[in-house]
């Protein structure tokens, strides 16, 4: 495919331990002894920034990783344990200048007040490059960590009780995001006076109670942290089906979706846009990024051989929720442009092996896209919202 995308692509990478393949930590390019060091994460994000990427996401959870969707496992041959994503982002922020930092936060079992001030703080530390990826959990063992409620074990995915539980968790996540956003707005931009001569540090009339009352949360506000530099840091979410598409449409600035072909791209984009219209947000910008796991090498044969080696180490073929791409930078560039032409505005790439595939993205895929006129050659904005072409929102509580 030789045609270029009408609009340059946006690119992000999803960082998860040694990489997205379960045997990634055993690859020669991996650094398993460094996984729990600040330097490891700083190095990954610096590599992504070298490639002029829009942002990185950092995975997190409320329980150890597991090969089972809903239960813990007792495996010893895969990475288990992780650092707190928000704290990793805060540590890395002063070491970077341009790239966005989007840690994962789990809405289920955590408090929106705490997350609002954590992400606002990250926005200050990074001078306007913060975001969050909101997710839910339906794992009973994770509910047991907190003891505030029980989560019934899912019997079958098509069971009506299961569908009701999942819908309720996503409704809770939507309320969660609404509380977080209102707390970010609970200080007007000029609430801080800081006039030493008159002794007035703050204008109390410009701090607002949010008085949120919903089925899941009752939060008065205001926040303890002044309004973030971006006004509203980026809110993102991963979605695979109608109920999470609705969360993206109601609450997010960026949604990550998992199409496997161009037909699915068109269908998913159409469904999310319809949900956006139903949510009354048709006029608001909403990016849709395609998620892909990538094995990226100079030749398709080398990429396939590396994937086979890792599958052999894992004793099973790797499959996931997203399409798995195995090939060369030119082939991946073709696929990204094909999907973009069908309606996606960007992509979140998941490096199969962080130590190998992340540098392949930043040093080989990006130059290939640049040659096609499909990706930036320099950072052109100082905030994450600016990189994505998203305006800084007005404060909902400020007098017009």
Image: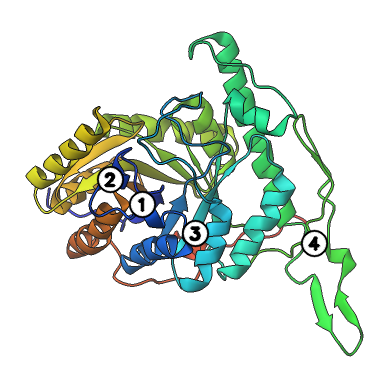
Provide residue 305's location: percent of width, then percent of height: 12, 41
Residue at x-position 38% and y-position 65%: 43
The residue lying toward the viewer, choosing from 70 and 26, is 26
Q: Is residue 25 shown left or right of residue 42? A: left
Q: Earlier in the sequence, mark 2 or mark 4?
A: 2
| Circle 2/circle 1 CB separation < 8 Å | yes
Q: CA distance from mark 3 to mark 1?
A: 23 Å
Which residue is more in the foreground, 342 or 107?
107
Q: Is residue 309 above or below residue 130?
A: above
Q: Earlier in the sequence, mark 2 or mark 1?
A: 2
Secondary structure of the residue carrying tag 4 is loop
Quick check: can you spot residue 46?
yes
* Label 2 Cα neighbours within 10 Å, binned few <14 / some 14-19 / many ≥20: some
Q: Please report whichever mark, 2 or 3, sits nearer to the chain's N-terminal start.
A: 2
Name the residue carrying label 3. Answer: 101
Residue of label 2 = 26
Is 218 left or right of 139, judged from the image as shown?
right
Q: Does residue 6 appear anywhere in the picture?
A: no
Residue 73, image x, y percentages = 46, 26
Which numbered disc, 3 or 1, marks the residue that appears first in the sequence? 1
Q: Earlier in the sequence, mark 4 or mark 3?
A: 3
Task: Relative to 359, say whether 305 is above or below.
Answer: above
In this rendering, the label closer to the viewer, 2 or 3: 2
The nearer-to-camera label among 4 and 3 is 3
């Amino acid at each position: 495919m030789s045609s270029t995308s009408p609009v340059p692509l946006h690119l992000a990478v999803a960082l998860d331990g040694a990489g997205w393949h379960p045997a990634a930590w055993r690859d020669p390019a991996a650094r398993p002894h460094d996984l729990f060091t600040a330097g490891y994460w700083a190095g990954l994000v610096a590599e992504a920034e070298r490639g002029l990427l829009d942002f990185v996401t950092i995975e997190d959870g409320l329980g150890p990783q597991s090969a089972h969707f809903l239960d813990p496992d007792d495996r010893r041959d895969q990475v288990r344990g992780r650092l707190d994503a928000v704290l990793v982002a805060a540590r890395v922020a002063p070491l970077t200048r341009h790239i966005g930092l989007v840690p994962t936060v789990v809405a289920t079992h955590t408090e929106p007040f705490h997350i609002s001030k954590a992400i606002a703080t990250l926005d200050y530390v990074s001078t306007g490059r913060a975001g969050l990826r909101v997710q839910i959990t339906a794992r009973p063992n994770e509910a047991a960590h907190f003891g505030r409620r029980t989560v019934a074990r899912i019997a079958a995915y098509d069971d009506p009780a299961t569908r009701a539980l999942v819908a309720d968790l996503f409704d809770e996540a939507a309320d969660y995001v609404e509380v977080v956003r209102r707390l970010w707005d609970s200080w007007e931009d000029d609430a801080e006076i800081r006039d030493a001569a008159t002794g007035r540090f703050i204008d109390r009339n410009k701090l607002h109670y949010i008085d949120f009352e919903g089925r899941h949360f009752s939060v008065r506000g205001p926040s303890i942290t002044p309004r973030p530099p971006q006004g509203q840091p980026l809110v993102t979410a991963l979605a695979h089906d109608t109920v999470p598409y609705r969360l993206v449409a109601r609450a997010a600035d960026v949604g990550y979706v998992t199409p496997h072909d161009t037909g699915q791209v068109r269908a998913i984009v159409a469904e999310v846009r319809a949900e956006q219209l139903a949510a009354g947000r048709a006029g608001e910008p909403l990016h849709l990024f395609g998620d892909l796991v990538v094995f990226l090498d100079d030749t398709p044969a080398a990429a396939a051989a590396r994937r086979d080696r890792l599958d052999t180490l894992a004793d099973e073929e790797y499959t996931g929720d997203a399409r798995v791409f195995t090939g060369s930078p030119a082939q991946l560039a073709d696929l990204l442009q094909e999907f973009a032409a069908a309606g996606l505005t960007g992509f979140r790439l998941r490096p199969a092996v962080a130590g190998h595939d992340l540098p392949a993205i930043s040093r080989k895929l990006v130059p290939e896209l640049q040659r096609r006129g499909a990706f930036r050659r320099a950072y052109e904005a100082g905030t994450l919202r600016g990189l994505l072409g998203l305006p800084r929102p007005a404060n909902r509580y400020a007098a017009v």
